[in-house]
Amino acid sequence: MNEQQDAAAVQVFPPAVPLLTILIGIGLNHLWPIDVKFPFPKIWRYSVGGVIIAGAIFCLGLWSVALFRRSGQSENPWKPTPQLVDRGPFRITRNPMYLQMILICVGIAIILGNVWILIMTPFSAWVLQRFAILPEEVYLERKFGAQYLAYKRRVRRWL
């Protein structure tokens, strides 16, 4: 198997997973609403959800993409990885872009007051882990060996 085929082991389009989680959660909330009375003003929900989303996008997503591109590689999980990136958010999580996606689900659920999205978010994380992260880890272990194994010992998969 050549490197391009080996890197293509990711079995889902990762951004589709949280997007479907959000859309299905919205649909379920229309069919079977779970009414939650929040003890604080709506502006707090918007503020907390917005801070979570903005933090996820800027501190995890965009910073990770910038580090990938600076190192000469693509953030696309189907492209070969020329080197490990272990700076920035990669020092605290091996998967900052996937963590960003999960945090966006949480932020949108808070903003919308949608319990269905919150209920489905752990499943979304599981799908990302099973069909994107685990295949990526197999590829990275094969390609970088001891260097990647040392990184795995230092940095957690999620947080």
Image (cartoon, rainbow, N blue to C red):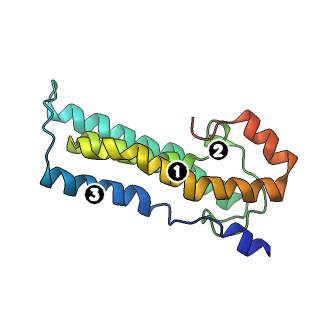
Q: Residues within 10 Å of mark 1 (few under 14, many from 20)?
A: many
Q: Please give left or right for residue 110 compared with residue 38 in the image.
A: right
Tell me whether circle 3 and circle 2 mark residues in contact (CB < 8 Å). Answer: no
SS at badge 3: helix
Q: Which residue in the protein does label 2 denote?
A: 94
Query: Mark 3 or mark 2: which is in front?
Result: 3
Which of the marked residues, 1 or 3, is nearer the chain's N terminus?
3
Q: CA distance from mark 1 to mark 3?
A: 19 Å
Q: Amino acid at mark 2?
A: Arg
SS at badge 1: helix
Residue at the far right: name it: 146
Q: Nearer the viewer, residue 19 or 35?
A: 35
Tell me whether circle 1 and circle 2 mark residues in contact (CB < 8 Å). Answer: no
Q: Residue at x 64, y 53 (%)?
A: 134
SS at badge 2: loop
In the rendered image, the quadrant that contains the C terminus is top right
Q: Residue at x 58, y 58 (%)?
A: 132
Res 77 quadrant in image: bottom right
Residue at the far top: name it: 39
Q: Which residue in the protein does label 3 denote?
A: 24
